[in-house]
């Protein structure tokens, strides 16, 4: 039985950087629930794993464990290590394309997008992702890090599992209770990869 969804989860902003025009025409591929480039190929990190991520200093320390746990869901839910935290990002700048994959905790959010719990921006070149940044909307939501999510709060581990799915190239998917479903209700616990998610990964990774 599904809880009533009152909020939408995430928008992915996908920015295709450059498709080299001198490259031979590239062959279209099945989506397998992945983002595709303009030539209908899946975009992903290919063999360039694990994705090295930074936690921005804006993320309060009490939330770090939930982030580590969300990475473990991906690292243990399939036969590849997808994520690794390399360091805290101490820079004063907000999210931007800077060659680092950074998780930001934001207290300012666009008024007309207040129902987003988080947002992941993915940058790619050809069919290869080169950077991804995550924004968590702390302006409009409170987050739970309890073993059982608090009602009225968003389970941070569940939200991060979803956002990390975007980082590795997955798009929204409403099949099989996927962790990539576009909505996550307050108090809902959805942390483990589902069969459909593993199937998507097997297609590309
Ligand atoms: Zn999303």
Image: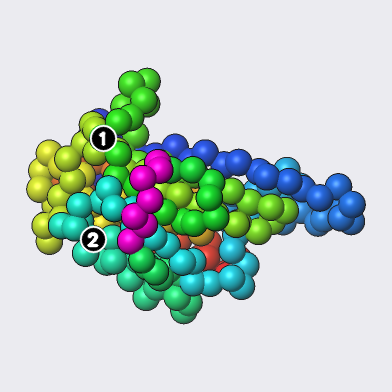
Please check the rendered image and state whether residue 106 is part of the magenta-colored stretch, yes or no.
Answer: no
- Residue at image x 44%, y 37%? 11
- Residue at image x 81%, y 50%? 20
**Earlier sequence position, callout 1 versus callout 2:** 2
Residue ID for mark 1: 107
- Compared with 63, 17 (above or below) is above
Q: In the depicted view, which residue is nearer to us: 94 or 168?
A: 94
Q: Which residues are magenta?
A: 88-94
Residue ID for mark 2: 64
Please check the rendered image and state whether residue 93 is part of the magenta-colored stretch, yes or no.
Answer: yes
- Report which quarter residue 77 is drawn in: bottom left
How far is the residue under mark 1 from the one under mark 2? 17 Å
- Compared with 171, 101 (above or below) is below
Number of marks in the image? Answer: 2
> Could you classify mark 2 by the number of other residues whose Cα lies within 10 Å: few (under 14), some (14-19), or many (20 or more)?
some
Left or right of 17? Residue 20 is: right
Instruction: For ligand 1, tell me if the residue under mark 2 lies within 8 Å.
Output: no
Q: Position of residue 112 (x, y in %)?
A: 37, 20
């Amino acid at each position: 039985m599904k809880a009533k969804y009152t909020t939408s989860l995430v928008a992915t902003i996908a920015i295709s950087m450059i498709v080299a025009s001198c490259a031979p025409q590239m062959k279209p591929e099945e989506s397998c629930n992945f983002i595709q480039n303009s030539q209908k190929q899946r975009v992903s990190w290919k063999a360039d794993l694990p994705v090295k991520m930074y936690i921005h200093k804006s993320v309060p320390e009490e939330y770090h464990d939930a982030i580590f746990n969300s990475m473990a869901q991906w690292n243990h839910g399939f036969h590849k290590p997808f994520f690794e935290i390399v360091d805290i990002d101490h820079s004063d700048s907000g999210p931007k394309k800077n060659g680092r994959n950074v998780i930001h905790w934001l207290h300012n959010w666009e008024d007309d997008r207040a129902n987003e719990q988080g947002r992941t921006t993915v940058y790619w070149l050809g069919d290869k992702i080169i950077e991804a940044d995550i924004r968590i909307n702390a302006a409009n939501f409170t987050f739970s890090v309890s073993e059982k999510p608090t009602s009225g709060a968003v389970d941070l581990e569940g939200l991060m599992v979803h956002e990390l799915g975007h980082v590795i190239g997955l798009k929204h998917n409403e099949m099989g209770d996927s962790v990539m479903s576009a909505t996550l209700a307050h108090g809902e616990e959805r942390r483990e990869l589902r069969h459909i998610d593993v199937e998507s990964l097997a297609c590309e990774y």
